[in-house]
Image (cartoon, rainbow, N blue to C red):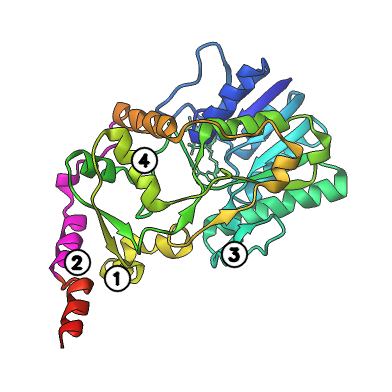
Amino acid sequence: MKVLVIGGTGNISRGIVAALQARNHEVVLFNRGQHVDVPPEDMRVIYGDRRQRVHFEAKVGAEEWDAVIDMISFNAEDTASAIRAFQGRVGHFVHCSTVMTYGPPFDGINLPETAPLNGTSDYALGKIAADNLLLEAHARDGFPVTIFKPSYTHGPGIPLHRQLGCGGVWIDRLRKAKPIISVGDGTNYFQFLASRDAGVAFAAVLGKSECFGEIYNLVHPQPRTWDEWQEVAAAVLGVSAEFVHVAQDTLIGIDTQRYIHLLDNFGHTQIYSGAKLAAVLPEFDPQTPVTESVAENIAWMDKHNRVPNSDEDDGEDRIIESIQSLPLATNLWRAFGER
Ligand SMILES: NC(=O)c1ccc[n+]([C@@H]2O[C@H](COP(=O)([O-])OP(=O)(O)OC[C@H]3O[C@@H](n4cnc5c(N)ncnc54)[C@H](OP(=O)(O)O)[C@@H]3O)[C@@H](O)[C@H]2O)c1
């Protein structure tokens, strides 16, 4: 197949490109050429900014594509432009949305694709608008779209997230044997998918006409808690992790700006059902050992200097110090018991 990937050098998209190449597809990328990682040498790249609508539509609309994978549509305008460019010229169009469209609140576990769309952030609202436009185009004109909704997907291309945020400073803290903050009691569950496993799903779905007009959650089938996740990173680094658990409300009270994202994403248990995708795509069977994908992610961060020096920001240390100066709940209980 001749497959165009819009994006292609990013976190999930590099997993997609690898999976497409493994299937011997002819892969073409469309990107600006600004990413720190460059495409494989022998790969054809059409350079441009997808938001320069006229240039983008003229360039990609000048060819026929067996499939197009759109990794960087964030709103109705991006997607309207893609529909104009590809209508009648594409065999299968795969659009990358997100599970963030479902909440907050994220009230339920194993949420299926039929769950109500409650997303409130600009990111979620933009994705919902883009998804709707594509489903309308499918219903109206038979636009051959499939929508994937990944949950958190890690790997080279972006720093390794923790519940507290998306920056990589916690890796430096772990390396320097500093304690790290864990939100609440650390038992919120999430799904952590390796980008190379995600890539397999994008590649394997191509050409499956039964998936046209359908939405699929793209998630790791085995959720784990954030503390387990942070333990994996510590194990990969060969250190032992010390967690200081701090209530979410306390964190937001201390620094609203810094921790507000907890409310609309990482502060909740989020478990989505992957059953619908598993039924049509047995090829998607995430097997990458988590220690391997996390090691790969950290290696990428080191290579690109994306592990900030924790000595340069004492915010986390100050919160930890204040929490540790409070009387321990166990001491309080002992005091009550002794009365
Ligand atoms: N990672 C997650 O946890 C997660 C979860 C759910 C959904 N998603 C979705 O996954 C998608 C991100 O894919 P990714 O991880 O591969 O992306 P990424 O790591 O953010 O990389 C972005 C890619 O797109 C290219 N690009 C960015 N802006 C562009 C523009 N205006 N025109 C042309 N090319 C552009 C970049 O190359 P240049 O800079 O060279 O242009 C790069 O190849 C998004 O749609 C996001 O909503 C991610």
How far from the left and from the top, in percent, is residue 196?
A: 53, 30
Q: Amino acid at mark 1?
A: Thr
Residue found 58% across the figure and 48% down from its top: 74
The magenta-colored residue range is 305-325
Question: Which residue is drawn at the image coordinates 64% and 58% (left, top)?
Answer: 111
Q: Is residue 339 left or right of residue 69?
A: left
Identify the disc placed on residue 108.
Answer: 3
For label 4, the residue is 232
Where does label 1 land, which residue? 250
Q: Amino acid at mark 4?
A: Val
Q: Amino acid at mark 2?
A: Ile
Relative to 2, does residue 167 appear above or below in the rendering? below
Ligand 1 lies under 8 Å from the Cβ of mark 1:
no
What kind of element bears circle 1? helix
Pick whichever, 42 or 22, lies toward us: 22
Residue mark closest to the camera, 1 vs 3: 3
Numbered disc in front, either 4 or 1: 4
From where the camera sits, is residue 80 visible?
Answer: no
Q: Tell which tag, 2 or 1, sits nearer the viewer.
A: 2
How many other residues sit within 10 Å of disc 1, few (<14), some (14-19) or many (≥20)? Answer: some
Seen from the viewer's position, the closer of residues 216 and 279 is 279
The x, y position of residue 61, in whole percent, is: 72, 29
Under mark 3, the amino acid is Gly
Q: Return the residue at label 2.
A: 323
